[in-house]
Image: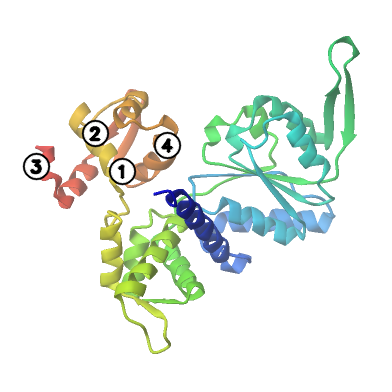
């Protein structure tokens, strides 16, 4: 038992390393989000021709859709270094000052979870974004004075899963805002085929289709399912003539069964949320705070992780009076063998 935390930590490091390996390193490798890519190319090419730093960019959308990957591709396109941090990591004004003053000309500052930036930090960020000036207060009381530092031309790229939580002053200072949406099955299929090649695994067309449909339209989830299917094939499957692991349809289905994920990508937590609304609140409407209490879950987790995909499927609706489970969810749950629970 004492080794469990260490194993968990090592597993997370391994997954992070694999995620980095699978991350596209060129525009041609980045599948999907075509309109966003086209707009970014124009914006970046124009900035390069003018010899200027690109406008500040805001990427928003559910987790796992490629916001961080886009930030790295932008940095590569501009030929500059990228330095990364997150909203929660910028606890004091000094933290932000240290990051900004160490940026070289044309470098990129990527801030993940931008909706969690401290309001005091935002006040310092405004002039840095607009005029490339850093205003710092030195000293306290009557002897306090303001010190202004000039910053090198830089581009700020922020990513958020909760754009509505960004303050209007901060949001308005970005030159362009791009909202990433869930991926089409065809795009997820291409991503899985590329990832399988990188991982040295051979996946049948049937297996790729099964995993793509269960991926929640999210590349990160698709790659996670592929890795688990590869593990299953390694233990229970066969190998091709080339010696690579074969992930076939049955292996993909068995992987999903072991993970308790259905063919549409619904996990136990998703089904539990729907069933809680159906059983305890007669299908809704129910307020999100009440729902969070019933599930012993944080409101942010419900709004950020569960609801977006369920709403995309047409299973859940947000109304002024609360959350409502829609007819397609009833039909899907019945298919999964929950008919007796819905009577």
Above/below status of 37 relative to 109 = below
The residue singled out by tag 4 in the image is 301
Residues under numbered marks 3 and 4 in contact, where contact means CB atoms less than 8 Å apart: no
Tell me residue 94's x, y (percent): 77, 32
The residue singled out by tag 2 in the image is 276
Instruction: Determine which of the numbered discs, if any, sits on residue 270 in the image.
Output: 1
How far apart marks 3 and 4 lie (CA) works out to 29 Å
The residue singled out by tag 3 in the image is 340
Tell me residue 138's x, y (percent): 86, 22
Q: Splitting the image into 4 quarters, where does residue 80 fall?
A: bottom right
Tell me residue 61's x, y (percent): 51, 44
How far apart marks 2 and 1 lie (CA) works out to 10 Å
- In the image, what residue occupies the spot 42% across and 35% down? 303
Left or right of residue 320: residue 15: right
Left or right of residue 43: residue 295: left
Above/below status of 220 relative to 285 = below
How far apart marks 1 and 4 lie (CA) works out to 11 Å
> Along the line of sight, which residue is nearer the eye, 194 or 89?
89
> Along the line of sight, which residue is nearer the eye, 140 or 196?
140
Q: Which sits earlier in the primary sequence, circle 2 or circle 1?
A: 1
Look at the numbered disc 2 and give the secondary structure of its residue. Answer: helix
């Amino acid at each position: 038992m004492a080794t469990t935390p260490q194993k968990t930590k090592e597993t997370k490091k391994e997954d992070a390393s694999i995620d980095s390996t699978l991350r596209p390193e060129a525009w041609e490798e980045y599948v999907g989000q075509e309109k966003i890519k086209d707009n970014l190319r124009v914006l970046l090419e124009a900035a390069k021709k003018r010899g200027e730093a690109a406008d500040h960019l805001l990427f928003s959308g559910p987790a796992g859709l490629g916001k961080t990957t886009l930030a790295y591709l932008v940095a590569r396109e501009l030929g500059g270094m990228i330095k990364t941090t997150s909203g929660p990591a910028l606890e004091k004004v000094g933290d932000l000052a240290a990051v900004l003053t160490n940026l070289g000309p044309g470098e990129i500052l990527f801030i993940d979870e931008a909706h969690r930036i401290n309001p005091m930090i935002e006040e310092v960020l405004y002039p840095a974004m607009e005029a490339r000036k850093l205003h710092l207060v030195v000293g306290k009381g009557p002897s306090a004075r303001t010190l202004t530092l000039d910053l090198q031309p830089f581009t700020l790229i922020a990513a958020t899963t909760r754009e509505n939580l960004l303050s209007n002053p901060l949001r308005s200072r970005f030159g362009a805002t791009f909202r990433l949406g869930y991926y089409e099955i065809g795009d997820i299929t291409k991503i899985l085929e590329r990832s399988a090649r990188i991982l040295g695994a051979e996946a049948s067309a049937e297996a790729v289709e099964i995993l793509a449909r269960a991926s929640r339209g999210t590349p990160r989830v698709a790659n996670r399912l592929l890795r688990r299917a590869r593990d299953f094939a390694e233990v229970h499957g066969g190998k091709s003539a080339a010696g690579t692991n074969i992930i076939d349809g049955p292996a993909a289905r068995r992987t999903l069964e072991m993970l308790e994920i259905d063919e549409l990508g619904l996990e136990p937590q998703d089904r539990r949320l729907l069933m809680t609304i159906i059983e305890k609140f007669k299908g809704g409407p129910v307020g999100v705070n009440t729902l969070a209490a019933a599930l012993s879950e944080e409101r942010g987790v419900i709004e950020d992780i569960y609801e977006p995909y369920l709403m995309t499927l047409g299973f859940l609706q947000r109304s002024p009076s609360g959350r409502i489970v829609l007819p397609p969810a009833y039909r899907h749950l019945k298919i999964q063998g929950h008919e007796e629970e819905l009577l």
